[in-house]
Image (tube, grey):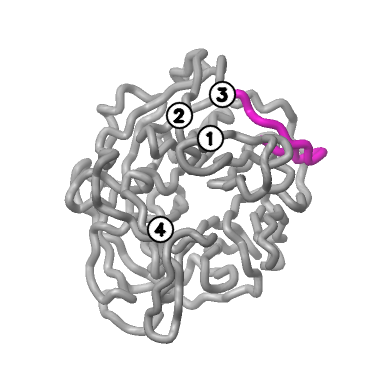
Amino acid sequence: MTEYGLRVGRAELVSAGPIAFGPAGILFLADNAAASVFAVDVADPGPRAGSGPFELADVDGRVGSLLGCDAADIAIRDLAVHPDSGNIYLSVQRGHGESAQAVLVRIDRADASISDVPLTDVPVAAVAIADAPAPDDERVDVILPLGDEGEQITVGSRTIRILRRQIRTSTVTDMAYVDGALLVAGLSNEEFSSKLRRIPFPFTDGADAAGNNLEIFHVSHGKWETAAPIRTFVPYDGGRAILASYTCTPVVHFPLVELAPGTKVVGRTVAELGAMNQPLDMVSFVQGGEEYLLVANTSHGLIKIARRDIDAQAPLTEPTEPIGVPRETADLQGITKLANLDGEHVLALQTDPEGRRHLRSLKSASL
């Protein structure tokens, strides 16, 4: 792994955050508390398990058993599928508050065995997020939590729960590796804080990172915004663009080609998926030779949007009821995380009515 700048050492994770695979099976792990991203050779042990569905019930209970704690003490921050073996990796926070620990967990696709992945004495590299909000930055990021954290508020006829967090916790909200660079969405220490960073890999000292401030038209809010962070995104059009989604819930197209570092980028809002709603994850998949976007969210079932409709959609720039691209909504509730398992299945982390979480495969042809 020396060609990627990795050296044997330790990934000293303070907090569990988004994860994403890069070249040669290297896993990127974001740590918002430390305002850093680690690149780790996870030494995945298995050959590709082949195509086919994967199911695993009571994931949080099983992970809790491995880590010696109750399921209620397990928070699954993200999941990623190894591009060669198909093994499943979970970014896990064990415990709560200052005593919480960040753990990387692997689930073997062949036999569903679970193990923790060593982060000491492994090939690793790290880069600091130079423009991260400071630990004492008093600004807050408001999210719609999945649990009972935060406070209840009533808006019109609806009562929802919100959680106010220091914006440093949203330094990195999502990541993806594209063409020699790690795309990192989140918040910065700037006045116009919504940011998309492009960090060359192999990492240097972070000085080569290029960033762009983002501006979008938020249909539900009826205004242009520069402070709201991307919650989740996917590379689009062969990496020449991304599709991103925000709380309350615009879907926005951002071109990446010919971007000058340090400039403001104005996104093209192509869909509005409803107020008081938060996107949780996104993936793209192919069905019948056409590409589609799937959006997991807090208020509706799984939302499916066709690429051809995204490409044809004019920018939304007026406050109105949810409009934009046509979409289909599947009656699949409780999905919080998505990942492409293989060419025929999308892997979903789904919470049942009792609050237990399960991994299940969704057949692409049936979505």
Q: What stretch is highlighted in magenta?
A: 106-118
Decide which of 263, 117 is in the foreground and name it.
Answer: 117
Amino acid marked by disc 4: Ala
Mark earlier in primary sequence (1, 3):
1
Task: Quickly name the residue at label 2.
Answer: 38
Task: Give the CA separation, mark 1 to mark 3.
Answer: 10 Å
Mark 3 Cα shell of 10 Å, populated few (<14), some (14-19), many (≥20)? some
Q: Quadrant of residue 288?
A: bottom right
Mark earlier in primary sequence (3, 2):
2
Tag nearer the camera, 1 or 2 = 1
Task: Give the CA separation, mark 3 to mark 4.
Answer: 30 Å
Mark 4 Cα shell of 10 Å, populated few (<14), some (14-19), many (≥20)? many
Q: Say whether residue 107 is magenta.
A: yes
Task: Give the CA separation, mark 1 to mark 4.
Answer: 26 Å
Q: Quadrant of residue 215?
A: bottom left
Residue projecting furthest to the right: 111
Tag nearer the camera, 3 or 2 = 3
Mark earlier in primary sequence (1, 4):
1
Amino acid marked by disc 3: Leu
* Residue 328, percent from left and from top: 57, 76
- Mark 1 lies on a secondary structure that is strand
The answer to whether residue 293 of the structure is visible from this angle is no
* Residue 229 horizontal side relative to residue 212, left or right: right
Task: Quickly name the residue at label 4.
Answer: 244
* Residue 329, percent from left and from top: 58, 75
Mark earlier in primary sequence (3, 4):
3
Mark earlier in primary sequence (1, 2):
2
Amino acid marked by disc 1: Ala
Task: Quickly name the residue at label 3.
Answer: 119
* Residue 64, percent from left and from top: 69, 42
Task: Give the CA separation, mark 1 to mark 2.
Answer: 13 Å
Task: Quickly name the residue at label 1.
Answer: 102
